[in-house]
Amino acid sequence: MLAALRASSSRLPSLASSSRLTASPRLAAFLSTETPTAASTSKLTAGDFLEPIAEFQAPKADVPPTPTPDRGYPHPSGPTKFSYSMLHMKAPKPKYKLHCHSTRNNTIVTVAKPDGGCLAWFSGGSCKFKKANRATYEAGYQCAVKAFRVLEGVAKDTPIQLELYFKGFGEGREAMKTAMLAVEGQNIRPLVCQITDRTPIKIGGTRSKKTRRL
C-alpha cells in the first residue's frame, strides 16, 4: 500500500510547491522519505492520509466586496418640524430712496418710492429762492427739511428703510449732511440703511462745457 501511494505521488506535481494547495506537514515528510522505516510506518494511521483532503480547498471566485453602509444612500431625514416662530416672520421693509443732486447753480432733492417712482421733489426754486440764491447753503437746507417731513409721514403708516444718494459737490451736499445730523433729522437717521455717492468721475471724454458767466 505504501509503495503504491509513493508511486502515484511521483506522477503528480509537487503538492508543497503549489500556490493554491496547502499540504499537511506529516504528508510532506512522508513523501520526502525514500525508504520508510519500521518506526515511521508504525506511527502512520489512516487519518494522516485523509487529513490533506480537508486542507485542499478550491480557489474562491472573484466576488465583489459587500458595500459598507457608508457607500450606500443616506438614511432619509425625518419630516420638517413645524414651529410657531415661522408664523411670526416679518416681511422685509420697503426701501425708499432720497436723492440729493447738488450743483453749483441749484440743489434738487427727490424722494423716490421702492419701485423708483417719484413721491416728492424739492429744489431751491420751489423753496422761494431766486436766481443765484438757489445754489446757496440755506436753499439746500430747506430742501432737505421738507424731504424729511415727507418721509416722516410715510414712516408713521408703515416701517420703512431709507437709502441716501449724493450726486455733485455743490453747497447743497453739505447742507443735506448737516440737516441729517441736526434735530430735523433725528427721526430719519434710524431709517438710513445705505449711503452712496453717485457722483460721476470723468476720465477723458469730450471737451467740457464753457464756464458760465453771470
Image: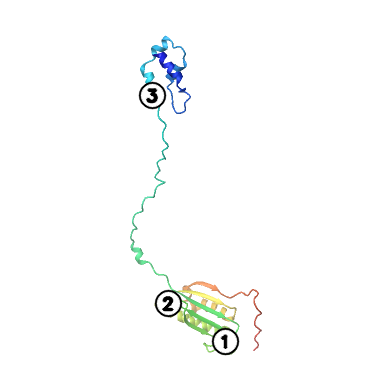
Residue labelled with disc 1: 134
Residue labelled with disc 3: 53
Q: Quadrant of residue 46?
A: top left
Query: Which of the two discs, 2 and 3, sits closer to the camera?
Result: 3
Which SS class for mark 3?
helix
Residue occupying the point 40% across, 12% down:
41
| Circle nearer the N terminus (3, 1) | 3
Picture coordinates of residue 179 (x, y %)? 52, 79
Up the image or down, 55 lies above or below 168; here it is above
Identify which amino acid the numbered label 1 is placed on. Arg
Q: CA distance from mark 1 to mark 2?
A: 29 Å
Q: CA distance from mark 2 to mark 3?
A: 97 Å
Of residues 91 and 156, the one nearer the viewer is 91
Report if residue 175 is visible in the image: no
Up the image or down, 106 lies above or below 85; here it is below
Residue labelled with disc 2: 155
Q: CA distance from mark 3 to mark 1?
A: 115 Å
